Image (cartoon, rainbow, N blue to C red):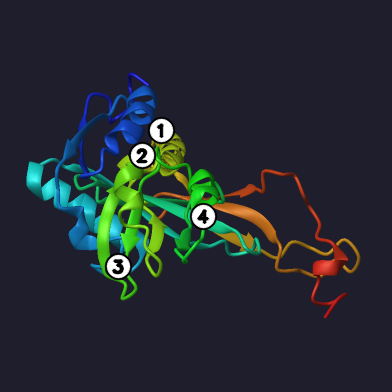
Amino acid sequence: MPDHPYQGRRVALATQHGKDRALAPPLARRLGLIVEAVAIDTDQFGTFTGTTPRAGTAAEAALAKAHAGMAATGLELGLASEGSFGPHPWLPFGAGGVETLAFIDAGRGLELTLSALSRCTNFAHHDVVGGGDIAAFLARIGFPAHALVVKGPDGDVLASGVQDMAALSALAWPGNRLETDMRAHLNPTRMAAIRALAGKLAARLAALCPACSCPGWGEVDLLRGLPCSSCNQPSQGVLAIIDGCGVCDHRERRPRPDGVTAASPASCDWCNP
């Protein structure tokens, strides 16, 4: 987009884990943004091993990282990411990962965050037992392309970034726990998820507000009240999407993209209380 406001602009990416490899191509291709990696100590905002707890939400941590990158470079544009991993919210026995990207345009007063939930993660752990075989676990999590963290019985981190079988064998003692290392540069599956979300961020920033022309126009809320197909009473289903600007107060309503105009009576509080 040669006439986009961000064409040729530089954005500071706070990272020490090579996330520019995932974020730079989509943003350059769609917007002409130039991503500049800044070696900020992002561990201060929280670590996956738990040695430094994250304060606040993932979005707040990503915004704090972006502000730190801007402060270090003096740039008006900032970018950062944050990941969260645990049990999938609705798939039993499955793991899920949520990636969050934060983009800041200080000149326009824009702070935008986008998040995406994915089941495509190798997030897992394995407790080593005497006589047990760890081969199946290693194959499932993609070792050695995906690194491991080794913790002792007391939870102390004995090693991180382990990608060598000889080094792992020396640490895989009964009572120790093997955990996937979720840092992006040591986890190709996570890096792919960040790249996919970067494409969505690029598309969001490519959309300009119809009122003030600020980048980042898109979904800001959902309007509920989809009428029941049987009784026509409003349900909790989504009736429409509310698009908005992150700077001015302009809002517009658009139909839900799947074309659904009525809710099933099974999800209606009137027909199925």
Asked if the residue under mark 1 is in contact with the one under mark 2, i.e. CB atoms within 8 Å, the reply is: yes
Amino acid bearing label 4? Asp
The residues tagged by marks 3 and 1 sit, at their Cα atoms, a distance apart of 36 Å
- Going from the N terminus, do you reach mark 3 or mark 4 first? 3
Q: To which residue does mark 1 refer? A: 206
Badge 3 element = loop
Above or below, 180 against 145 in this view is below
Q: Tell us which disc is closer to us: 3 or 2.
A: 3
Badge 4 element = loop
Badge 1 element = helix
Amino acid bearing label 3? Gly
Q: To which residue does mark 2 refer? A: 215
Mark identifier at residue 133: 4
Asked if the residue under mark 2 is in contact with the one under mark 3, i.e. CB atoms within 8 Å, the reply is: no
Task: Using residue 229 as the reference point, say whether residue 38 is left or right of it.
Answer: left
Amino acid bearing label 2? Pro
